[in-house]
Image (tube, rainbow, N blue to C red):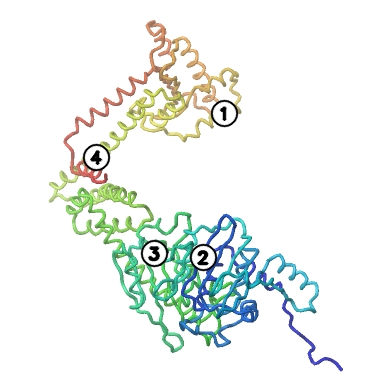
Amino acid sequence: MASQNKYKITLSLNILNHLGINLYSNVPSVLSEAVANAWDADATNVTVNINADDDIITVLDNGHGMTAEDLNDKFLHVGYKRRDNGEAITPRLQRKVMGRKGIGKLSLFSIADTVEVHSVKKGKKSGLIMRLPEIQKAIQNDASDMEKPGTYHPEPVEENKIAITEGTQITLKDLRKNIVRTAPYLRTRLARRFAVIGEKNQFTVSIDGVDISIEDRDYFKKLQYIWTFGSESENYKIQAVNQEKSDTFESSLEIAGETYNVSGWIGTFRNSGDARTADDESLNKISVIIRGKLAQENILDEFGDAGVYASYLIGEISADFLDSDDSEDIATSSRQSLIEHDPRYQELKRFVGKKLDHIRNKWTEWRNAEGEDKARQNPAIDAWFKELGVDSRRNAKSLFGKINQMKVDEEERTRLFSHAVIAFESLSYKDKLNDLENISIDNLSALSSIFTDFDDIEATWYHQITKGRINVIEALREKVSDNALEKVIQEYLFEHLWLLDPMWERATESPQMEITIKKAFDTVDAGLSQEEKDARLDIRYKTTSGSHIIIELKRPEISVTTIRLIEQVNKYKKALQKCLVAVEKQQEPIEIVCVLGKYPTDWDDPDNREMLKANKARIVLYGTLIEQAYQGYKHYLDKNEDKGRLMRLLENLEVGSL
């Protein structure tokens, strides 16, 4: 007679690999499962100890413990659902249990090869040791014979080797390499994964003897603004000791005619840099907490908001309604995220999205107002702002607000406020040109005022350029006095050609011209000798003001004769002339400047000086060019001591920004 059970479902031990053994990759996630089990065991105290020398982590709780029968039927029973077995609420402290799938204990093998469990329940001791290599061997044997049910037998621990007197102790040995296990690191991350740690919930967790507290989350002190959900979350505002503004959201939302409550908070950092930890971990997240434990690390990713404010966001939203005992489990198999298409999750997402819209608007409003306040802390900016008209003030406020939203540090922000004033004044050029359009035969007197403002703005910018050039000259003085390397000084002169000739404002070719000419030497049949090619190593080439300039630079202490200098100049000049002929630019003038620390040793001979001049070359001494440039620009500054309004403002900005 044929069997009534024609088909059957078989489960391989290999499922353990997918459900837990390879599920996690970091210590905080794994320890979270052990801490959650302690909560479900009515523990009031959990102690985590790290023995870095022996590669051991121990988790000890004072919960109700387990007998050998409990270990077999519950702890070792993969997929045991305590909520379906009358254990949805803990017997002593009436807690809602965190566990649901019955697979969390498997995560221990994500970081350790050996797991030892000691437990005491009502004075009765039980213990076992599980070794990952043996489990994997059992998995292989199981895969080879699908007719036999998969079974692994942990090694029992004798009672006399169990030292604890209550609760459960889990010891993780043979830890994986390259996992972070330092106490400060774990304390911070466990603090962020649980919202029930602390005396309020009769649940103390310590690492190496130091209790974890809400302060260990290490982000409340960085918050500038905070929004809380409902009256039960007001304590978070107290934790945000440096917050400047706060608000409270309603905490209820409706799903299918039923009303549910959330708690928690959303905040914004003062500085965008605060959104990253010292080890470059992002805090720019809004976590979802269920029954006091992290359920989804970041719901913020769901919104894809590209607004600047979004990079300042952080938050924690507790939504226990997502894990009702009589509803489908909303957690994914990894227990680290939620099923996104679940209607409950979608409603939560809509609820959070509306709050984020409100936060975006308030954050922009508050930061704009703060931007004006911060900018006007500089007395020079405050005085400037008071002189503005109504429309200009509105525009200035908007500009300051935008700067205050930028992702920069406070020092840079202060500098940008000053730059904004300068930019604002620059834009007045456009306004003045518009004013010219409005001049009529009846108001010609206004023309004088407009051109006076033009003069003020123009003189100010030239004054700033001149001050900048004096700074360059002083820096070059230091390089010459320090006898800097030839190439260092050469680069300095090359970037600031006005040092050699005030008419040479800036080069008109790209810095790649050096490469272009070298390619021309290599490819154009200009008949250059190897000696001429080698000589070119000592020159720099640029074009400016319609001339081809060759700069022959010597270190300040080098002595040279005029004859030798002329020989080099002729090489450079002839080489360049051949290249210019090849590109049909032979009519364009060539100027050669020889920059020396002192005149040639035979400079007294006038014939030598004439020969140098005949080759369109001239000598400039470092000391002479520096002093002449300095005196010329300094003379301008001294002559224009009668500063205009904008000039005075810029100087005050420099003082006020210090």
Of the image marks 3 and 2, the number of the one nearer the N terminus:
2
Of the image marks 4 and 3, the number of the one nearer the N terminus:
3
Indicate the secondary structure of the residue bearing disc 2: strand
Q: Which residue was labeled with disc 1?
A: 520
Residue mark closest to the camera, 4 vs 2:
2
Tell me: residue 117, above or below residue 521: below
Of the image marks 4 and 2, the number of the one nearer the N terminus:
2
Quick check: 362 left or right of 317? left
Which quadrant of the figure contains the C terminus? top left
| Residues tagged 1 and 2 counted as in contact (Cβ below 8 A) | no
Return the x and y of residue 74 as percentages of the image width and height: 61, 80
- What number is the disc on residue 123? none
The alpha-carbon separation of the residues under discs 1 and 4 comes to 44 Å
Q: Residue furthest front?
A: 160
In front here: 201 or 425? 201
Return the x and y of residue 497 as percentages of the image width and height: 38, 29
Indicate the secondary structure of the residue bearing disc 1: helix
Q: Quadrant of residue 509?
A: top left
The alpha-carbon separation of the residues under discs 4 and 2 comes to 66 Å
Q: Which residue was labeled with disc 4?
A: 460
Q: Which residue was labeled with disc 3?
A: 215
Of the image marks 1 and 4, the number of the one nearer the N terminus:
4
Q: Which residue was labeled with disc 2?
A: 48
Residue mark closest to the camera, 1 vs 2:
2
Return the x and y of residue 305 as percentages of the image width and height: 44, 66
Indicate the secondary structure of the residue bearing disc 4: helix
Q: For the residue marked with disc 4, what is the amino acid?
A: Thr
Tell me: residue 478, above or below residue 106: above
Q: For the residue marked with disc 3, what is the amino acid?
A: Glu
The alpha-carbon separation of the residues under discs 4 and 3 comes to 52 Å
Q: For the residue marked with disc 1, what is the amino acid?
A: Ala
